[in-house]
Image (cartoon, rainbow, N blue to C red):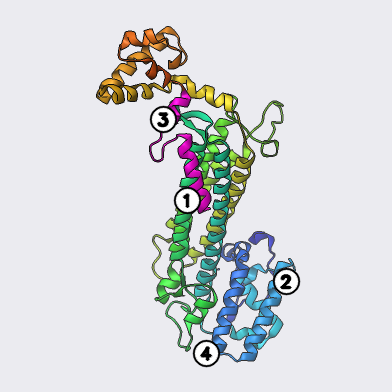
Amino acid sequence: MNNTEIKPDKGQKMWGGRFEAQPDEALQAINASIGIDYKMWREDIDGSIAHSSMLAECGIISVEDKEKIHAGLKQIADEIAAGKFEFKVELEDIHLNIEARLTDMIGEAGKRLHTGRSRNDQVANDFKLWTRRATTSTIKQIKDIQKVLVKRAAQHHDWIMPGFTHLQTAQPVTLGHHLLAYVEMLARDIKRLEAAYENAGDCVLGSAALAGTPYPIKRELTAKELGFNAPAGNSMDGVASRDFAMEALGALSIAAVNLSRLADEIVLWSSSQFAFARLSDDWSTGSSIMPQKRNPDAAELIRAKAAKISSASQALLMIVKSLPLTYSKDLQEDKVLTFGAFEDFWLCTVSIAQMMEKIAFNRENMRKAACFGYSTATDLADWLVRTHAIPFREAHHITGAVVKAAEQAGYAELCDMPLDELQKIDERISIEAKELLVVEASVNSRQSYGGTAPSNVLKQIEIWKAKL
Ligand code: ARG
């Protein structure tokens, strides 16, 4: 739904008291936000219930009026949930749409709801509430991805694949280790989102237009009712600030970039050149002219979504950067960016979790690739250092000569090179060293904390299983 799909009628505007003419249609179109902010109707209703409860508690409205307001708001919630609510573009936004309907329904009492608040604190509060809820559900979804990755890592804790730097074969690693790398990244994404949630803990409602209100309101009641930690300490900050959304979008951008890297690996691994993995049929798409194709569309779109999400974050920063305190209408554009970024992100989380759950890895191809490119050269250098106390730089030089000789003689792997040829380069190289040049020996040797050895990977998996 967008503003142009919601047809204006010529009803009286909520703020129309001092104007003679109706706003131009083009003004309505640029000014209205109902096409976007209807998505926070639940938060608006929750905020209004909390606000009116507090007003009654403080004796500012009567208990009867409060009950009428609550009943009306609950009915409106049912109407919206059932798709029966008529959103009107001339009522600009979700706040005025709900308030107008409430007044239609319950009359006088509906008009008292807006006592001691303004749309400025109302919108900031609804939006903050929406962002907090979205953050909570995002954290849950990221944990779901972690669970899938830990499960797949356990199944493949000792499957050998090439580890890359510069996308050049560097050293053999285990697939379990590779997958757990993402589990670590996602754990930090969760921490950043948790911090964003925590930093959005101040309740704005009751800041009113910008300066507070003369009514004897108790803002701590509203804050508590809505699950916030405390009322915001400064009404101007309350209505003017959107850094809670910037922080959430910043954290979301980083998380999206992390998912994008995994998505990119899915694209690479499922190509016929790599052939490390095959996406399940239900996560592959076909080509209209090339019947052999199995395209990783969802993974590619995750890469693109990460670009969109980070530009939403950038756009919000730019919207706010030159705004004097307090509210300016520029701030209305915060929601289309934030809602869109979260919605895109949720498509990514579901897609990644499912693709990774069902992707089939090819053990043979990965192992074969891990052997190419003289991936165990460092193992030889490390052995020379360990066994003969040769300084690493010198060991590196000897190993370089071995690689060169292997290449010239046409051996695909270092472990194919006969011992006597190895000893021609350096007579200290023994059969024990030669045996280290197979990829299994290489990964098994990397037992340092955080290293790729399958035994290490199993330990990390236990740690993650306990945490998740
Ligand atoms: N729809 C507006 C927004 O999203 C609500 C606040 C309007 N406040 C005002 N003073 N015009 O920002």
**Tag 3–tag 4 contact (CB < 8 Å):** no
| Pointer 2 local density, CA inside 10 Å: few below 14, some 14–19, many at least 20 | few
Q: Is mark 2 within 8 Å of ligand 1?
A: no
What residue span does the magenta drawing correspond to?
A: 439-468
- The label on residue 445 is 3
Disc 1/disc 4 C-alpha distance (Å)? 44 Å
Q: Mark 2 and mark 1 in contact (Cβ < 8 Å)?
A: no
Q: Three-letter amino acid code at disc 3?
A: Ser
Magenta span: chief secondary structure: helix
- Cβ atoms under marks 2 and 3 closer than 8 Å: no
Mark earlier in primary sequence (1, 4): 4
Estimate how packed mark 1 is, as few (under 14), some (14 to 19) or many (20 or more) residues with alpha carbons within 10 Å. Answer: some
Numbered disc 1: secondary structure: helix
Label placed on residue 79: 2
Residue 451 drawn in magenta = yes
Label 2, label 3: how far apart the Cα atoms are: 65 Å
Circle 4 is placed at which residue position? 58
Q: Looking at the image, is mark 2 or mark 3 earlier in the sequence?
A: 2
**Residue that badge 1 annotates:** 187
Question: How far across and how far down the image is residue 104, in percent?
Answer: 70, 81
The secondary structure type at the circle numbered 2 is helix
Q: Residue 283: give x, y in percent of width and height.
A: 66, 39
Instruction: Tell me if residue 23 can be seen.
Output: no
Relative depth, front residue between 208 and 449: 449
The residue at the point 46 percent across, 13 percent down is 416
